[in-house]
Image (cartoon, helix red, strand yellow):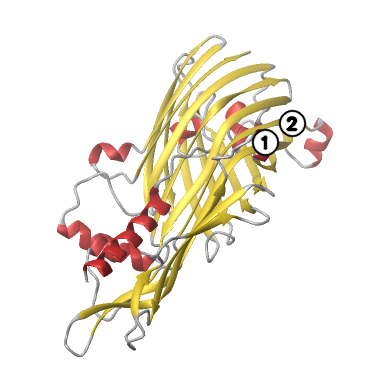
Amino acid sequence: MKGQYRIISILIVLTLVFSVNLNIMAAWSARTIGLGDGFAVITGSDALYANPAAVSADDRRFNLELKLAAEAWNNLLFNDYITQAKMKDTLNKISKNGMVVNGNGNLGGNLSIGPVTAFADIRADGLGRLSPDFTKLFFAGEIEDGKQYRIDGTAFFASSYLDTGVNLSLKMPDSVAKSLQVERLYLGMTYHYLAGAAVKSSGTGSIGMEFDQDGDPYISGNTSQLDAQYSDLDNFKIDQLATGSAFDVGVYAELNDKLSLGVSLLNLGASLKVDQALYHQYTFAYEDTDGDGQKEWDTADDPEEGVLSGGFELKLPTIFKVGGKYNFSDSFAVLANFTNKSYSDQIFTKTLSDQKFSLAAEYIGLRILPLRLGVNYSTLQRDFDLAAGFGLHLGPLKLDVGLADLTGLFNQSKGVAGGLNARIEF
């Protein structure tokens, strides 16, 4: 029995490692973190990963910016001590998505001259999911008699890469804007060239516990597998980088001096093709290994590993945004936004998506000290986030800070995010 429990422990550890070991980055800015989302109506360089049409809509002529941001969250655990009552409540809240853990951030900079912006960021994107059955097993800490725990749905992907490209944000002629009954209209597109490394893994099968005729427990289940495909970093060469490209498109319109609207599609066709790749496959077989008629659940002596013929392609999530902004005055505005982020079913057995509803306010009455506050709800994270940020704007030199989730101050947060931007703009 010790060997069987050891196998279960190994399996749980492996799935957790595949699901939660994310040291990854994606695209944010201090301002978007302070507002709680990348709003489709945000203007300036902060719109680079929110709406490519709005990047030059702030009428600035020159912008040189450096930025740093990071975020991590999960959909079940709060930053608080887990009591027995909270554990029971967590078990009741486990949905069809199981346990989901995500981490993202970015480090880089951009240069804007007129309507053209060039950028270079170190980015990554990734997400891990533990199947609902194994999530319950992890939190309950014991196997229920006669129950089969399915591994299917456990999956993980991550990619770390250099994202370079160019954005073009153009103001349409006034005649075109007037024909559409808006004051100003912008169209924009961004091209991304991606180069880096990637990994993806998944699990299949099931395990359970039953009792033989003597009343002794034994492990049962189906043949199960955990596999991983990843870039060959041991023999890494520049010409073996995982490469790919992506496009962003967007529209930004100012209907009048009060109301603005924006729509964008991000990461169109985004993927990383890994030509030089390796694989590991762990097999847990439920079969009669001793020829005594008694099936046993055991692991293969050694994992299967080697070079993955033809490599693999990692599709990055596609993002849709739509939002609006209302200026109550020259110094105070309210923003609303809807974001849908869709992860490829190439990785997860069914397409995994996250819908985020966001509302924020920005006060610029104190020109030297703009203030921001936002709240959002994520259907995948299953949580409300409270965000805040501020800036220190000294003429052409501008510094911005954003923090979330501020409910963590009350032990009610499932994640944390922070960002810092510095730019020269005129």
Of the pair 211 and 71, the residue shown nearer to us: 211
Residue 391's label in the rendered image is: none
Residue 367 spot, x, y in % from top left: 49, 15
* Residue displayed at 30% across by 40% down: 407
**Residue 63, located in which quarter of the rendered image?**
top right
Residue of label 2:
168
Residue 308 spot, x, y in % from top left: 61, 55
* Residue displayed at 79% across by 33% down: 172
Crowding at mark 1 (Cα within 10 Å: few <14, some 14-19, many 20+): many
**CA–CA distance in space, label 1 to label 2:** 7 Å
Of the image marks 1 and 2, the number of the one nearer the N terminus: 1
Of the pair 331 and 107, the residue shown nearer to us: 107
Q: Is residue 346 left or right of residue 97?
A: right
Figure label count:
2
Q: Are marks 1 and 2 in contact (CB under 8 Å)?
A: yes
Residue 52's label in the rendered image is: 1
Of the pair 331 and 137, the residue shown nearer to us: 137
Residue 240 spot, x, y in % from top left: 66, 40
Residue 221 spot, x, y in % from top left: 36, 77
Q: Is residue 404 above or below residue 424?
A: below
Q: Is residue 255 left or right of residue 133?
A: right
User: What amino acid does circle 2 point to?
Assistant: Leu
